Image (cartoon, grey):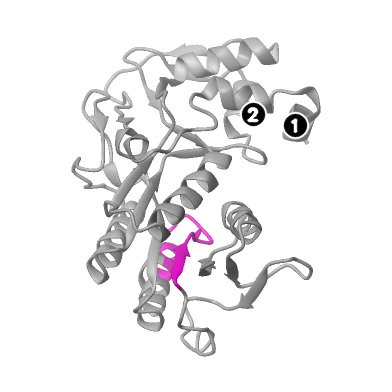
Amino acid sequence: MAKILIVGCGAIGSELAGVLTAQGHQVTGLKRKPPALDRINYVTADITSPADLANLDTDFTQAFFIVSPDQRNEQSYRAVYETGLTNLLAKLPQSRWIMVSSTSVYGQSPHGEWVDEDSAAQPENITSQLIRQAEQRLMASNPDNIVLRFSGIYGPGRGYLLRQAMQAPVIQQTPAYFTNRIHQRDCVGVLAFLLERCLAGHALAQCYLASDDDPAPMWEVMTWLAERLGCLPPTAKNVGEDVRINKRCSNARLKALGYRFHYPSYQDGYLELLHPQKIMRIND
């Protein structure tokens, strides 16, 4: 049994807390507004405030950093990835960390090339730059710390592509624009898997990319979804200088470590979301 802290208990963090608690670990969730009733022990705190962290225990074996900025702007990203992370590393210098990051740190590739953990991570926009700087700070603070880069997350309550497919969208068809995804259940699965490997004493890399086995052209995904939803198919976009260039994310390192995806492709994951009752909730 390990003493574990989960910073950021949204959908992924709270589900992870339940999984680890069921495995017998002592789990504490840190959240600004914890739920009133939950089997997880919560600490109410804002990570941007050192005063809020003053009474937090410091003997956690493992800590997870699974935060979401309030808004998609520089100020919100600086609050959590600069101020918040700095406060946590100062408070818990001896804890081992797993930080949830994003494949947005790669920026775009010229022709949809494959990227992996060794590919250059030089994003152009400021929010992704702040995530990348947080990665570097976390890895430099302890060689046992791990950065986990998720691609686009989908699953229950995350119906963006389904809603888009229902609207006969205009999609880039040629050259192919690839979409990289991971189901929410696999996000939790990978986090629990890495923890298990850490506690078992396995030698781990400092960075893992978590995306499913099937980076697929957005045109293919939208066409497939539209057929199963009974909607009009997408329309091919006329592309010129504004053509969207992109990347394909490799999960080879994670799979070599032994992880097997619950949903290896978008078809596996979305078929489960295409039940009539669930589609009705997406439309609400």
**Closer-to-camera residue (111/113):** 113
> What residue sits 59% from the left and 68% below the top?
27
Q: Residue at x 52, y 24 (%)?
A: 266
Report x, y in % for residue 239: 34, 17
Q: At which x and y percent is residue 42?
A: 65, 73
Please give the name of the residue rendered at 37% of the width and 50% of the height, measured from the top-left corner: 148
Question: Foreground residue, 79 or 277?
Answer: 277
Q: Could you tell me residue 117's position as x and y percent?
A: 25, 43
Q: Do the residues labelled 2 and 1 touch (CB within 8 Å)?
A: yes
Say the numbered circle drawn on residue 283.
1
Residue 74 visible (yes or no)? no
Residue located 51% across and 84% down the image:
57
Measured Cα–Cα span from mark 2 to mark 1:
7 Å
The answer to which image quadrant residue 61 occupies is: bottom left
Q: In which quarter of the image is the N terminus?
A: bottom right
Residue 62 shown in magenta:
yes
First of labels 2, 1 by sequence position:
2
Kindly identify which numbered label has been placed on residue 208: none
